[in-house]
Image: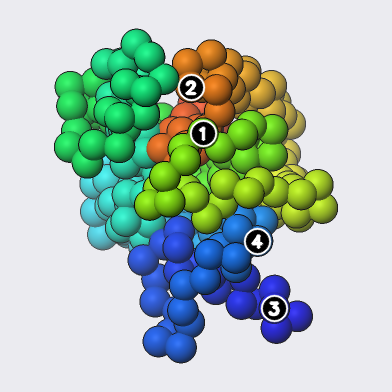
Amino acid sequence: MQQQWRLLLTAVMFYTRIPVGRNMHHATGLLSKATRYLPFIGWITGAVMCGVLYGAHFVAPWTVSILLCLTAGIWTTGAFHEDGFADMCDGFGGGWTKEKILLIMKDSRIGTFGMLGLLLLMLLKFYALQSLPLLPALAAIAVAQPLSRFTAVTIIYTHPYVRENEDSKAKPVSKGITGPELALAGIFGLLPLLAALILLQEYRLLLLLPALWLARAYMSRLIRRWIGGYTGDCLGAVQQVAETVVYLCFCIVEWKYT
């Protein structure tokens, strides 16, 4: 149990800006095993975002509350996944060979493709959440944060890591993930969806599972075709796309059937 607690704290330390104590030190071996808790990090991020949204809606307009909620999520993770999405947009938008794509993604500067991609992604998130009433919006966030991270974890399970340099931010998780670890990640990723279905009694939300599968299939095909596997930026991009798909599915169900 102590080992699992240490793995969880390692995941918190790597994937968020939340302090875990001075006695907790980075260890590559631990981080590789801590990947199983990435969807649980979504529970933490989702709790922060939901707390901010719920509190803000008492004192601010709904649009401002949504902006504060999204800002809180970005602050909690240090824009970890958003950065990966922007880098992937730049790499796949401006590169035509594997080597060029990887080189562009490694560049810390953001380009036109990354800027436009991130802007459109954030607008989709904002308007999807803004269209929802309070309870469905809270449920969408609580579902999207863990489930999108589980989607990224499945990429680690099915794809090879393609960078060879030791300084990459995804190098510690490049050893992959085992079947039992994936199952544990799946429990953390899917439980909030089950809870939302029971709470909202809106079983049409199950449609988000095939929608996520289609989004994952597209991202999977894209990275296999062009670079042969995943990088840390690709994982961040998959998470961001999956999160947005969940918000859009909640938005469509709310708009179409109410």
> For mark 3, what is the residue?
3
Task: Count neighbours of disc 3 (C-alpha within 10 A) and say few if under 14, some if 14 to 19, many if 20 or more.
Answer: few
**126 horizontally vs 195: left or right:** left
Toward which corner of the image does residue 210 lie, by quadrant?
top right
Q: Secondary structure at mark 4?
A: helix
Residue at mark 4 to residue at mark 2: CA–CA distance: 25 Å
The mark lying in front, picked from 3 and 2, is: 2
Q: Which mark is residue 162?
A: 1
Please, is residue 239 above or below residue 219 in the view? below
Q: Secondary structure at mark 3?
A: helix
Task: Count neighbours of disc 2 (C-alpha within 10 A) and say few if under 14, some if 14 to 19, many if 20 or more.
Answer: some
Nearer to me, 228 or 153: 228
Q: Which mark is residue 33?
A: 4
Which of the two discs, 3 and 4, labels the residue nearer the N terminus?
3
Nearer to me, 34 or 257: 34
Q: Residue at x 37, y 23 (%)?
A: 99
Q: Amino acid at mark 1?
A: Val
Which of the two discs, 1 and 2, labels the residue nearer the N terminus?
1
Which of the two discs, 3 and 2, labels the residue nearer the N terminus?
3
The mark lying in front, picked from 4 and 2, is: 2
Q: Residue at x 81, y 47 (%)?
A: 179
Q: Which mark is residue 241?
A: none
Give the percent coordinates (x, y) of residue 144.
Answer: 54, 42
Please, is residue 15 above or below residue 96 in the view? below
> For mark 2, what is the residue?
227
The mark lying in front, picked from 3 and 1, is: 1
| Residue found farthest to the bottom | 23
Q: Are marks 1 and 4 in contact (CB under 8 Å)?
A: no
